[in-house]
Amino acid sequence: MVSPSIFRLAEMIDKKAYAARLPRLREALNSAGVDGFLVPLADEYQSEFPPPGAQRLAWLTGFGGSAGIAAVLPDRAAIFVDGRYTLQVRDQVDTNLFEPRHLTQQPPSAWLTEYAAGKRIGYDPWLHTADGLARLETSLDKAGVSLVPMDPNPLDQVWEDQPPPPADPAFVYGDALAGRNSADKRAEIAGVLKREGADAAVITAPESIAWLLNIRGNDLSHTPVALSFAIIRADGAVGWFIAPEKLPADVAAHVGPDVTIAPRDAFAPALEALGAQGGVVMVARATAPVRVMELLEKAGAKLLRGSDPCELPKACKNSAEIAGIRAAHIRDGAALSRFLCWLSETAPDGGVDELSAAAKLYDFRAGGEYFHGLSFDTISGAGSNGAIVHYRVTDSTNRALEPGMLYLVDSGAQYLDGTTDVTRTVAIGAPTDEMRDRFTRVLKGHIAIATARFPAGTSGGALDSFARRPLWQAGLDFDHGTGHGVGCFLGVHEGPQRIAKRAADVPLRPGMVISNEPGFYKEGGFGIRIENLELVRTQIPQAGEELEMLAFEALTLAPIDRTLVDVTLLDDGEIAWWNGYHKRVLETVGPLVDEKTRDWMEKCCAPLTR
């Protein structure tokens, strides 16, 4: 929200316009001979932050979150969001037009089964993945609901002022920061294809292409990628499908002769030509558009449905990336510490609101070395707004920070050498006993993850309950995952690693970066979240251990509000973690800040005692 370049589609439109858009879409669907249509948030690249012209869900409904889907029928419509957005969706969407439903507890399949039995429901095959569509089809078959591919997208035909695709130029990401050259990476992926018996792989995730080719871009507001597709063959040759005007001469020279560049509209014909060769083609079921698989199969290819071959090596950071990520977090910690010091002096006296606080934090970060922008819109929530998990402050929702409130700020930045994501919850004035109890339970869960030691081969799902146990003991929980992967000057949400109740069975590996962010949210009251990024590393063996053990290293370095801690709820080990962490924060970040901030940090980082 603080970066003036961030596009806020939902806020720029008169809300009265939404009532007119739904009938226009229904007219287009009726003309096309279908009974309904699915409108996902995703674009054809499955971008977390789609560009303006791909924000179809926001254009139709007004919803501005990062996950959701709408279903439109002739006489009713619904929007489905996960637990992070159940409050936000009601604030942003006209519930007379769209019925809000929980994505997992009240899924689209159940709603369509109830209201669209025997009907034909359209979908854009470029916007849905094979996995997602297969799950939906399986659920709808018994109700006789037919899913009908529609290309072109009927919503695009009624969106008269739809913005054009982004045209910002790509740029070279140097080998010194990347840690490996592109040729080496291409050879590694070619080796994966050979081992899997594949002749080629289709890469549809721009983050994977950015990693593979050592390039970056500015096509998305928070993720530094150039939107494109690629095909890599088992000999390491790459076909890269990107608008020619997006490639300066140095980028074309950088990728070299083994990378053939073609315009974006040549991608579908290239898939058909690849399929006609009758070979085995690897495609990522979870991220590739279903249209990609249709084109390949229809042309004669044998599909190897698996994962993106770049995903795992991209997630396991090399030594140069790890060094850069550590350096980025130290600079980011200094900026955040200066902000927290400023907040402690300014907020209790009034005059600070959610917008001005987020803008001030942006200013502290923007002056830092290698700063490239925010990694997501800052979540700046005071009081009850902090209970909205992915709250987005606007002029109409902006609240002042007042004594007696908790203030939750979840923010991050993109630096050329690393991506950051950190949450701190701050008491404005004296907190209540309830606030301190809930905060300390969240802290205990955070410490449990931070201090976990686990055998190699352990997935994030096996660790998730560590973070929840202190809350469960009080009959409490939080409705989001405990941790997500983070890229290196790439996506702030990166797979395949996660810590969550239903996390995929993907083992955590050395070099992965993952968030540690348990929380608690009291609707209408306050929100609490404590988030650090953690590096998965090999643990030095201890006497008698027979297994290879892994552990976490905290990358984020910034004080946690000690006024919210009920020390009586902490055991000796938890107090030792707190003291060790804050000693490291002071020693590492303290020399980089001004004298006033340093004095404030010394008080914040003093050892806890009973």
Image: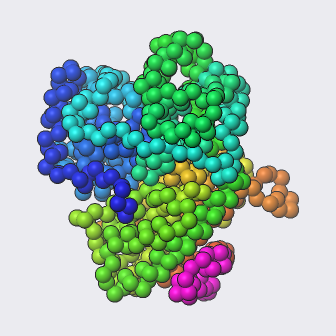
Position of 261 with respect to 96 (left or right) is: right
Residue visible at 51% across and 40% down? 248
Dominant secondary structure, magenta: helix
Membership of 28 in magenta stretch: no
On screen, residue 276 above or below 181: above
Q: Look at the image and name its color scheme.
A: rainbow
Task: Pinpoint residue 279: horizontal percent, then vertical percent.
Answer: 60, 15
| Viewer can see residue 472 | no
Instruction: Kindly tell me whether residue 220 is visible in this rendering.
Output: yes
The image position of residue 196, as x and y in percent, is 68, 25
> Which residue is at 46% across, 18% downward?
269
Relative height, residue 199 to residue 495 (above, below): above
Identify the residue at horizontal 42%, vertical 80% (top origin): 343
Q: Position of residue 326 (x, y in %)?
A: 64, 62
- Residue 600 magenta: yes
Q: Nearer the viewer, residue 164 or 574?
A: 164
Q: Residue at x 30, y 25 (%)?
A: 152
Image height of 329 relative to 24, above or below:
below
Q: Is residue 183 above or below residue 90?
A: above
Tell how many labels: 0
Residue that lies at the very extreme toward the front in this rendered image = 249
Image quadrant where one finds the N terminus: bottom left
Which image quadrant is residue 357 in?
Answer: bottom left
Whole-percent x, y for residue 228 in the image = 48, 35
The quadrant in which the C terminus is found is bottom right
216 to the left or right of 33: right
| Image position of 558 (left or right of 404) | right
Which portion, as a residue range, is magenta? Answer: 583-610
